[in-house]
Amino acid sequence: MLDIKLIREQPEMVKAKLGLMGVDASEVDALLAMDREAREAITEVEKLRAEINAASKLLAKAGPEERDNQRTALRAIGDRITELDSNRAANEQALISKLLVTPNLPDDRVPVGTSEEDNVTVRTGGSIREFAFKPLPHWELGEKLGILDIERGIKLSGSRFYVLRGAGAALQRALISFMLNLHTSKHGYTEIYPPFMVKRDCLVGTAQLPKFEDNVYHDIEEDYWMVPTAEVPVTNLHRGEILEASQLPVHYVAYTPCFRREKMSAGRDVRGIKRGHQFDKVEMVRLCTPETSNAELESLVDNAESVCHALGLPFRTVLVCSGEKGEFNTLQYDIEVYAPASKGEEGGEWLEVSSCSNFGDFQARRIGLRYRPSPGAKPEFVHTLNGSGLALPRVLIGILENYQNEDGSITIPEVLRPYMGGEALIR
RNA sequence: GGAGAGAUGGCUGAGUGGUCGAAAGCGGCUGACUGCUAAUCAGUUGUAGGUGCUUCUGUACCUACCCCGGGUUCGAAUCCCGGUCUCUCCGCCA
């Protein structure tokens, strides 16, 4: 959520930046008007309340006949307050509702653009393999090896579900363990095991709600929400707290399954396991001071890339343009792994395996997460960041397709072998 | 799932309709004193919002907040209703 004070004080700057995110200047004016109205109403209500409080204090000392005299007049003021205040509350709610769906201000470094074409590649890693044979897509490899069972996934749960079996399931589990160990032991993260269902407030805190409500699974009876990413529970972990500056930065890593309706993606990416309603992900979350968040983002991206390096997967890191990036972050890097056969007959494609973002104080303001810059100082909002490290099914695709051999077997990347009983091959 | 108890400031803990934003103690901060540590004394010590002055630091006034949301009342920490959470006992259970 943007700071309404910032909008009030620098409306032109806000308009310019939100313009890049597709928000019309008139929307900002509307916010300003609502803000002005709300403040006028507050002043009015508080004035009346002060009046009634003062009179009540006098009444406390007055005799009974005096009380009877004033009672009617005071009640009239009270009724007026009730009326004005319910009006004010409605206006304020409207303002907040609007603020909750207003995008964040993009960083100056965000490339201006409308489509993937406008993303800027900042780094590449590994090298794209030259095949001496025609590489197969992962769904064919997986079915042939008996490690991926899409048909039965559909039988159990419908489209966009699949079953991993034997070495397929083991490979996924190996990847999760490997990534968690890498981030905790080499990169200094603290591992978190969070709830996979959370309260509504958490989703509002990280900004999946209210805007993307139709993408999240929801138990109506208990009002539990299935996490669409570990970002939600982990970023909300310190909700409402004031951290000491000495506690920052906080680096958390968590493995969770992720649940998404994928309504807006209906019909897209239907082949294979690239996009499902349920997938696994290892997620990194950072909390830090405003001064350090730029550097924290770079190191976060570096941590995510190191997984690709370790697994020997060819990847590129792109700075995502204004039209493609998440609306609520200030800057976003995506890491894409090359999958040589993922489009079937059409060949290969770059698969997004990680998205690393700086949210500035946008989420912290919603979550009420602050820190004290120095002992006794006024609390300020922290900056929050998160990035996948990495998303499992797409890494699985990357491994199957890049490490496939002509006989249909899969060579297991060396770093994973200790997690796979020392095996070097899936066949 | 059943029965009961409870939720007050950083902490402990008073307070059952009228200067209660809230006693007291602890802790924190400031000053005095003691040649160190400690002790003693005095003062001070929540958060958010609005408005004016000041303008880059504050200051004055006002408002709200004693789990959350409603209600009663001229006036609610205190009374009523709904909810959340915690604890105890019973049941069930990986």
Image: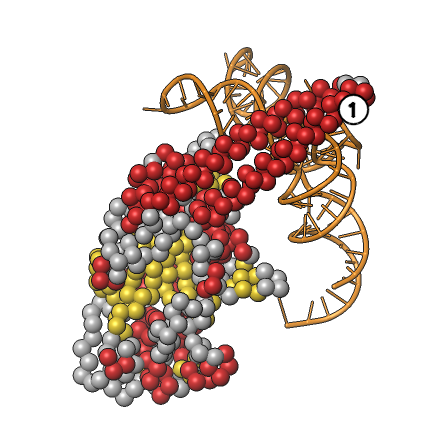
- From the image, tell me which residue sits under label 1: A68
| In the depicted structure, whether residue A257 falls above or below residue A373 | below
Q: Is residue A323 left or right of residue B88?
A: left
**Does A166 sit left or right of B15 as displayed?**
left
As drawn, A17 above or below A219: above
Which residue does the image show at 26% across and 51% down from the upper left? A110
**Helix, strand or loop status at disc 1:** helix
Location of residue B91 (image quadrant) = bottom right
Name which residue type carries label 1: Asp
B83 and A71: which is toward the camera: A71
Left or right: where does residue A271 sit relative to residue A228? left
Q: Residue at x 59, y 60 (%)?
A: A223
Rendered image coloring scheme? secondary structure
- Which x, y percent locates residue B40? 64, 18
Query: Percent position (x, y) of residue B82?
Result: 71, 52
Query: Chain for mark 1?
Result: A
At 36% across and 34% down in the image, what residue appears?
A9
For residue A81, which quarter of the picture?
top right
Q: Can residue A321 be spotted in the picture?
A: yes
Tell me the quadrant of the picture where the C terminus of chain A can be found.
Answer: bottom left
